[in-house]
Image (cartoon, rainbow, N blue to C red):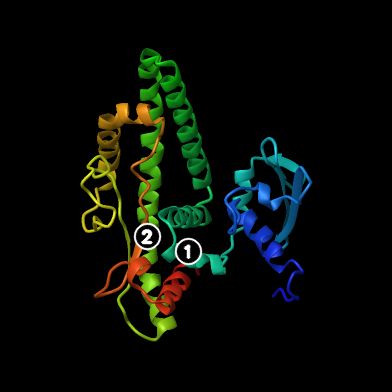
Amino acid sequence: MIVGRNGQGKTNLVEAIAYFASLRSHRVTGDAALIRAAADTGVARMRIAVGEREALLEVELNRQGVNRARVNRNGVKPRQLTRWFSTVLFAPEDLSIVRGEPAVRRRFLDDALVARNPALAGVLADYERVVRQRTALLKSARASGARSSLDATLGLWDEKLVELGARIMVERRRLVEALCAPLIESYRDLADADHSPRLTVEESVGAASDPDVSRETDRSASPPAGGEIPRRLWGTWNPRSMFHVKRSSARSAMHWPPSVRRRSSGPSRSSARTGTTWHSASMICP
């Protein structure tokens, strides 16, 4: 238990501990805000012990260049830190999981995936890298007008994007399925009532290319099967290749979030009262 007066750094300490588990802050999107003002580098160290085994974890955050990590003074990739330590952080910001934008729920799911299977940190990092490189290719092709060189390389990036995106979507579904039973039990214990909450994934695969399909449409009743995801992702990408070139963007069809629903009501984001929203957030996070 961490106890102290306001302004003594309790949140900073909790944030540093949680960073080793997810390589992310729960307050900000980038690492620059975690570095002391006027400094170029920030270092966090944590010693963990399991039985008689101990390990010293270190992470160096840099304003310029890549971050670095060490385990027992030996250099490792930062993503390997998540294999040594896991934690659950519940903060006021978690209310945005229910009330916030879809990106908040995607981030929550991805953090939970890494906590459950640290190896997925590499898959998520590779996906973000491919998106950035594909977007850079589209911007370059748009500026130069060289469609011939684009056609030769865009397909390779699309193939990798579909491969990684399908893997992430499958893992997200498995996680949501695993959370359903604990969610119902936790909600019942917390609210002392059975409102039959359910957690669903609303995916845009197969619908993203249709401009008449609203984000509020419930597609959770019949999501595509795991083997169908790559085929449907290709079906979403190919008709929109020229659109992506014109927009210079690489928006993915896998980017619609999970939602929490209660019996006889709509999504908690738009229909739940404050108390129920807190129930929804707190029953998911633990």
Foreground: disc 1 or disc 2: 1
Which residue occupies 76% across, 51% down? Answer: 36
How far across and how far down the image is residue 230, in percent? Answer: 30, 38
Displayed quadrant of residue 202: bottom left
Numbered disc 1: secondary structure: helix
* Rendered view: 42 above or below 241: below
How far across and how far down the image is residue 134, in percent? Answer: 44, 29
Q: Could you tell me how far apart the alpha carbons at marks 1 and 2 are, in whole angstroms?
A: 18 Å
Would you name the residue on which mark 2 appears? 176
* Residue 50 visible, this orientation: no
State the residue in front, 98 or 169.
Answer: 98
**Residue at the far bottom in the pictured view:** 192
State the residue in front, 63 or 170.
Answer: 63
Numbered disc 2: secondary structure: helix
Amino acid type of the residue that numbered disc 1 sits on in the rendered structure: Ser
* Residue 185 visible, this orientation: yes
Q: Which quadrant holds the N terminus?
A: bottom right
Report whether 38 appears left or right of 199. right
How far across and how far down the image is residue 238, in percent? Answer: 27, 30
Amino acid type of the residue that numbered disc 2 sits on in the rendered structure: Val
Which residue occupies 59% across, 52% down? Answer: 24
* Rendered view: 44 above or below 8: above
Query: Which mark, by number, is residue 96?
Result: 1
* Rendered view: 51 above or below 140: below
Q: Residues within 10 Å of mark 1 (few under 14, many from 20)?
A: some
Q: Earlier in the sequence, mark 1 or mark 2?
A: 1
Which residue occupies 32% across, 66% down? Answer: 267
Q: How many marks?
A: 2
Displayed quadrant of residue 175: bottom left
Which residue occupies 35% across, 54% down? Answer: 173
